[in-house]
Image (cartoon, rainbow, N blue to C red):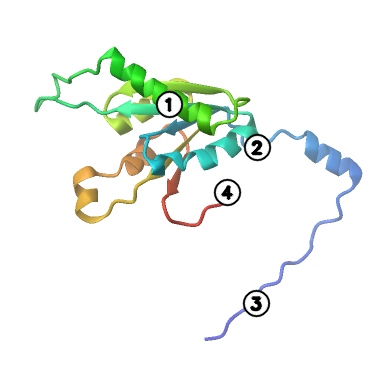
Amino acid sequence: MKSQTFERAETSAPVTASQDDAMESTPPVIQLKNILLPLDFSEMSLKSLQYAIPFAKQFGAKLTLLHVAQPVDYTVDFTNLVSLGSEHFAALEKQLEDIRTTNIPSDLPVDIVVRHNFVFDGIVEVARQIRADLIITTTHGYTGLKHLMMGSTAENIVRRAPCPVLVVREVEHDFV
């Protein structure tokens, strides 16, 4: 088998000072204003902060930290969902606030949202409400029977999200 080497040809003229100034004044092609971070408080979900914070700084975007509390008890027809008490919501909001103060620079704008819903439904719903430009989520990477039984929240988010989704894996090449 013969290998081929490709060389890149220089086809563009050198950039002049006036062209350089024009490039600097051109607005970025991608504009992120709202970044949604679904968090389940696991160490893996917090890895999404490694990506979200630099994106928010670079684009001047607001971060929305979201925790979706899945219904605990329901009937076969899903009519009697047990709702969480206000104390439980306050405790979840406090956990998100602790993450905010511990991990996120104070100069970044952050909203905190807690919802009671099925996880991927709640994430997609909030993404639509805040008009998210990007969702940064993580995957636990379940395979086999565990994936079959639990499904993939990340996969469902990607399939139904109203915006692009960056899925951060536990053990893969990181670019931050």
Q: CA distance from mark 4 to mark 2?
A: 21 Å
Q: Residue at x 71, y 33 (%)?
A: 27
Q: On the image, numbered disc 3 is attached to which residue? A: 5
Query: Does the rendering let one see residue 41?
Result: yes
How far, Cα to Cα, is label 4 from label 1?
23 Å
Side of 121 relative to 149 (left or right) = right
Amino acid identity at mark 3: Thr
* Badge 2 vs badge 1, beta-carbon distance below 8 Å: no
The reply to whether discs 4 and 1 touch (Cβ–Cβ < 8 Å) is no
Question: For mark 2, what is the residue?
Answer: 29
Q: Quadrant of residue 167?
A: top left
**Is the residue 170 above or below the residue 35 in the image?**
below
Tell me if label 4 and label 2 are in contact, CB under 8 Å: no
- Return the disc, 1 or 3, that comes first in the chain's sequence: 3
| Residue at numbered disc 4 | 176
**First along the sequence among labels 3 and 2:** 3
Closest to the observer: 162 or 90?
A: 90
Residue 155 image-quadrant placement: top left
Verify CB contact (< 8 Å) between mark 3 and mark 2.
Answer: no
The three-letter amino acid code for the residue at tag 2 is Val
Q: Position of residue 98 (x, y in %)?
A: 46, 26
Q: Is residue 53 above or below residue 110?
A: below
Earlier along the polypeptide chain: callout 4 or callout 1? 1
Which mark lies nearer to you, 4 or 1? 1
Amino acid identity at mark 4:
Val
